[in-house]
Amino acid sequence: MGRLIRRVKATKVSVADNRRIVREESLAVEEPLEIRLGHESFSVTMRTPGDDFDLVAGFLVSEGLIYEPEQLISLRFCAGEDENGQQTFNVVEAQLRPDVAMPLPSAQRHITTSSACGICGTASIEAVHKSTHFKLTSDVDEVLISASVLAGLPEVLRGEQKLFEKTGGVHAAGLFAPDGELLSLREDVGRHNAVDKVVGAAFREKQLPLRNTILQVSGRASFELVQKAAMAGVPVLAAVSAPSSLAVELAHNSGVTLVGFSRGATMNIYTHPGRVG
């Protein structure tokens, strides 16, 4: 975990007796990643290093640029050095198949995307509403997962968060089978990055669409996370915290079962409850 954790000094203050102790703390690393299409810069996102190829692949799926593995010819790190002359691994170039439609200039990210927001740099709100190639049926009445199994996923996710255990500063996304088996897990300072890494890993393994899966996330359910689930064909998205109103609207329209406040004993199912038995 050398590139994922940085040790820094911090002064711990006890308010009760004003005691102060200087000690080292472990922090999750946050660095920029520039994504290039060919030789042209497409986006810069702030992320936790690691699984960068998965992140880029998942991001391109979420952007609606690719949906079949054959459309992504290659991924490679470009030259980039820090002040000490060390390779930073902070630039990834994606080569797409010649027939893949390149994004319009209006769809490019003109500012750096922070780890807190995955769509802040989108040039227009219309560009956010993308069409998935893996459409979900909205009138679902077939149970995909039992409520008891779904309720236990946050605990499983938390138990596998190795980076969070050391830093307490990252989000997680986990892809689960209907019986509760953990298929894939990724961590990142950005919740959207964690989801992109999970989706990208599945994409590179030729597993899209992710029809028979559940995506469990450690934070809240935002519009962008619902969009990423829909773009990958994920039928159920569950979060331990609240969804936004726009997330619920998009989930309803895109056929995604959206679950919030999933914390063991109870949960709220906001859309398409027929998938949860």
Image: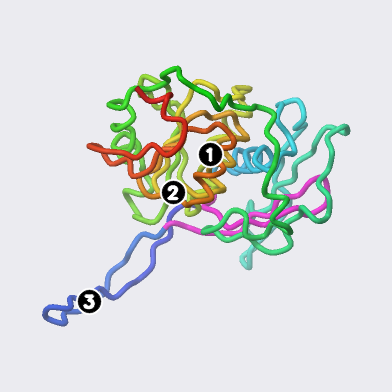
CA gap, disc 2 and disc 1 = 10 Å
Q: Is residue 138 above or below residue 122?
A: above
Q: Secondary structure at mark 2?
A: loop
- In this view, which residue lies farthest toward the left? 17
Q: What's drawn in magenta, residue-wise?
A: 28-49
Q: What's under tag 2, amino acid-wise?
A: Pro
Marks 1 and 2: in contact by CB < 8 Å? yes
Residue 243's mark?
A: 2
Say the numbered circle drawn on residue 200.
none
Which marked residue is nearer to the observer: mark 1 or mark 3? Answer: 1
- Tell me the residue that label 3 is attached to: 13
For this view, does 106 lie left or right of residue 5?
A: right
Q: Quadrant of residue 206?
A: top right
**Which circle marks residue 251 in the picture?**
1
Furthest toward the front, the residue is 139
Q: Quadrant of residue 93?
A: top right
